[in-house]
Image (cartoon, coloured by chain):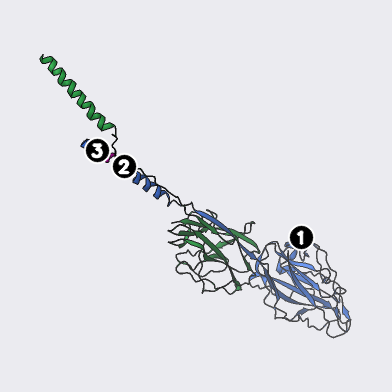
Chain colours: A green, B blue
Amino acid sequence: MKIKLNHDIYLVASSFLVVILTFLFFKPVFATVSSTSTVITVNVNSVLSINSSGSVTINVTPLPSGVQSANSDNVSVSTSNTNGYTLQLSNASSSTTSLSDGSSHYILATPSVYTSPGILNANYWGFCSTTLAGFVCPSGPLTNQTISSSYNFAKVPVLGSPVSLKVTNTTSANDATTVWYAASLDTSQPSGNYTGVVMYTATPN
Amino acid sequence: MIISRTFSRNINSAILVLSVLLSAVFISGASATVATSSTSTLITANLSSVLFLSSSNCGSACNLNFTPTGTGTYCTVYDNLSYFTNNSGGYNLYISDNSSSTAALIGASTIPSTATVSGGGSASALSSANTWGYSAYPDPYSLSSTNGVKFGSTVNASTNYPSGVTLGTLSGGLQTTATTGTSSCGTSSLTGSPTFAGIPLYSAPQVISYSASQVATTYSTVFYGIYANTAKPSGAYTTTVVYTIVAT
């Protein structure tokens, strides 16, 4: 009898436990308002585009004392990125900063660096951008002018070590940046067409 | 029942929180940006060829002033040239008379130029009276075996050039010790057996200096010699010599 009573107790207890577990794991249906929601997400990716002139030509007819010519490149950046963009400049080459005529003749990059631009002496080339501190650029193209100490130029760094020309913090449409390139040459530099490629890189902030 | 309702609310709350979290994830995804964008520009420096040439010693005229003897008198005078070019292909420096018909000195009579020498040929002494010619230093033969005139067997200024001129030099070989534009004359044969070539006509200029690459300021000295006797009437005999530098 005692044993049966215990059995009944266990039966009742087990049934009660089943009920409890049923409530725990199965959502009961009550006659109340039920709702659900869906998140509508529109992913608007920011866009960024960059353009440059593609070609800058500097014509020089040298004198023994040296002359300086300069011309400019216009870089425009558009972005919908609300944090703006960073514009960087470097050579396309990671190994040289010189202009070459393809025949073992070179116009070397000025030894001045962008943190300390300086006069562009004879037989060097360099860049100038007023977006950077310390630069004083020509107001217009120069052709065979006396080498001027009024302007400051620096070498275009190699690929991988770019100089940041501009940092913005908002969207922009065709935001223009002017970059000047100049060469100072005397008659000791062999004649010819000396070329090099510079690269502009715009990165969303 | 109360317990189960509580669970229901908690589960609904959990779903709501999960939705909010998912929304946050999606909202965060909305600020994704495109990759870095680049462009490039070709920088070209067009360096033109330039040439420069000047004759400095004689100025406007090289004068051979002398009094002849019956057996003949030798006189020399020289002109200094300086020139440079940045032309990567170098240059040719030519000499010629300004006439395409004669290179004679013309005055009361004519004093013809000694025999011209073809490219690479050897010049010779002024052996015939009443002739004149030119010599050059450095010897262009050593610079261009095909175009230049060989003025001596070796490039040795002390033996190749006229007497009366001490071959002191400035940088580049400029002859310095003779008085500017004046002649040095003597009655004997010129010391060192200098050799001369005839002045070519304007239509056939002759190379006196040459390079296959650009040169900084370079110097050449051109000597003019005459061997004349009293058979020629006195007076001024003149012609004009042209120096031309051409990019190659």
**Residue at the spot x=77%, y=79% of the render?**
B185
Report the residue marked by disc 2: A33
Quadrant location of the C terminus of chain B in the rendered image: bottom right
Name the quadrant containing residue B10.
top left
Q: Which residues are magenta?
A: B5-18
The residue lying furthest to the left in this view is A2
On the question of residue B73 being in view, the answer is yes
Q: Amino acid at mark 1?
A: Ser
Name the quadrant containing residue A82.
bottom left
Secondary structure, magenta segment, majority class: helix
Quadrant location of the N terminus of chain B in the rendered image: top left
Chain of the residue displaying label 1: B
Q: Does label 1 lie on the same chain as label 3? A: yes
Q: Amino acid at mark 3?
A: Arg
Q: Amino acid at mark 2?
A: Val
Residue B145 is marked as 1
Which of the pair A29/B199 is nearer the observer? A29
Q: Residues within 10 Å of mark 3 (few under 14, many from 20)?
A: some
Name the quadrant containing residue B224.
bottom right
**Residue at the spot x=18%, y=20% of the render?**
A11
On the question of residue A188 being in view, the answer is no
The residue lying furthest to the top in this view is A1
Which of the pair B99/A118 is nearer the observer? A118
Q: Does label 3 lie on the same chain as label 2? A: no
Mark 2 residue element: loop
Which of the pair A182/B242 is nearer the observer? A182
Q: Residues within 10 Å of mark 2 (few under 14, many from 20)?
A: few
Where residue B26 appears, as percent x and y from the top left, is 40, 47
The CA span between labels 3 and 1 is: 113 Å
Report the residue marked by disc 3: B5
Chain of the residue displaying label 3: B
Relative placement, left or right, of A125 versus A10 is right
